[in-house]
Image (cartoon, rainbow, N blue to C red):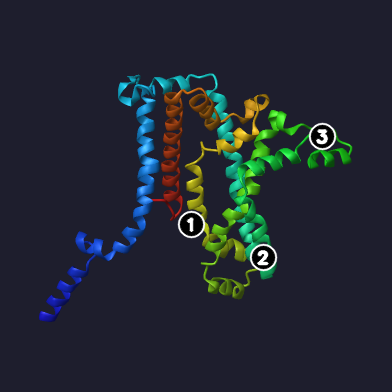
Amino acid sequence: MRDIGRRRKETVNQSPKGPKLGIKKYMPFYIMFLPVLIYYVVFRYIPLIYSLIISLVKYQPAKGILGSKFVGLEYYLQFIKSTFFVRLIRNTLAINFLQLTLGFVAPIILALLLNEVGRAKFKKMVQTVTYLPNFISSVVVVSMVVTFLSPSTGLINNILQAFGLEKVNFLTEPGYFWMIFTLMTMWQTTGYTAIIYLASLTGINSELYEAARIDGAGRWKQLWYVTLPGISSTIVLMFLMKVGRVLDVGYDTIVLMYNPSIYSTSDVIGTYVYRRGILNGEYSFGSAVGFFQSIIGLALVILANKMAKKYSETSLW
C-alpha cells in the first residue's frame, strides 16, 4: 500500500496539469516560441488595433488618433455603397477562384508526379527548376511577363504570328488579365508549395504500398487509396490557410502589372486601398477597407474550418 501511495504521489507530481511543473517541463518550447509571439504582437496585433481605431475616426496625422473626430462606421458604409464595391469584390473573388482551382491543385499534381519518378537526379533537377522562380523578385517576374507578352517583340506574339494569327496586346485587354495573373502566380509558387506535399509524402508508411501491391493494386489504385489519403490532412490544412487569404491576392504584384485600360478586371480590394489610402492620403478609409477584408477572411476561415471538422478528421482547431 505504501508503494501504491508513493506511485500515486509521483504520478501527481509528474502530471503536466500543474501550471508550475508544466512551465518547467516545456520551458525550452516556450523560449523558442517567444520570438514568434513578440513578432505577432508587435507587427500584427498592435497594427491591427491601430487600424481598427483609425478606421473609426477621421484621422488627421497632425491631430493624432485622440484628436481626430469619431465617425463610427462611416467609412465602412462609404466603401460598401461605393460604385466600385461590386467590381472590386468580383475581381478579387474571380482571381482567387482561379488560384484556388488551378493554383491549389497544381502543387499537389506536381508533388504526386515527382513522387512517382524513380530517377533521383532527374527528380532533383525538376524540383530545382520548379521552385527557383519563388525566389525571383516580383518586379523581375512582372518584367519577364511584360517582355514575353510584348505586342511587338514578345515571344507569345511571335508564335501567334508564325501560325498566321494576329498579334494581341495582352496587357491592355481586360479579358486576359485574370488568366495571365493566375498563370504567372502558378509559375512562381507551384514548385515551392509542392515541397510541402513532398515532405508529407515521405511520411507515408511504405508497408501500406507493399500491402496494396500484394492485394493486386496497380499504380493508380495505390495513388488513390494510399497516397492521397496519406496527404489528405496536409491538403485540408493548406486549403484552410488559402481560404483565409481569399480577399488578399497580392496587390503589390498587380500594381506593377495593371494600367487604367484594364481596371475593369484588374482592380482588386488591395489596389483600391493602395490608391485611396496611400496615394490619396485617406488613411481612415484605407484602414476601414483593410479591416473589412480581414473580418471577411476570418469569417471564411471559421466557416471552412467547421466544414473541414464536419467532413474530415483534420481542422485548424
Q: Are marks 3 and 2 in contact (CB under 8 Å)?
A: no
Q: Secondary structure at mark 2?
A: helix
Q: Are marks 1 and 3 in contact (CB under 8 Å)?
A: no
Q: Residue 127's x, y, as percent?
A: 64, 60
Q: Secondary structure at mark 3?
A: loop
Q: Residue 123's x, y, as percent?
A: 67, 65
Measured in 3D between alpha carbons, the distance from the residue under mark 1 to the one under mark 2, in whole angstroms, is 24 Å
Q: Nearer the viewer, mark 3 or mark 2?
A: 3
Q: Quadrant of residue 163?
A: top right
- 294 left or right, relative to 99: left
Q: Which residue is mark 1?
A: 233
Label 1: how many Cα within 10 Å (few below 14, some 14–19, many 20+): some
| Image disc number at residue 152 | 3
Label 3: how many Cα within 10 Å (few below 14, some 14–19, many 20+): few
Q: Quadrant of residue 220?
A: bottom right
Query: Does 45 appear above or below 275?
Result: below
Measured in 3D between alpha carbons, the distance from the residue under mark 3 to the one under mark 2, in whole angstroms, is 37 Å
Measured in 3D between alpha carbons, the distance from the residue under mark 1 to the one under mark 3, in whole angstroms, is 48 Å
Q: Which residue is mark 2?
A: 123
Query: Does 200 appear above or below 259?
Result: below
Q: Quadrant of residue 155?
A: top right
Instruction: Identify which amino acid the numbered label 2 is placed on.
Output: Lys
Report the residue at 64% width, 51% height from top.
133
- 307 left or right, relative to 128: left
Report the residue at 79% width, 32% height from top.
168
Report the residue at 57% width, 44% height from top.
100
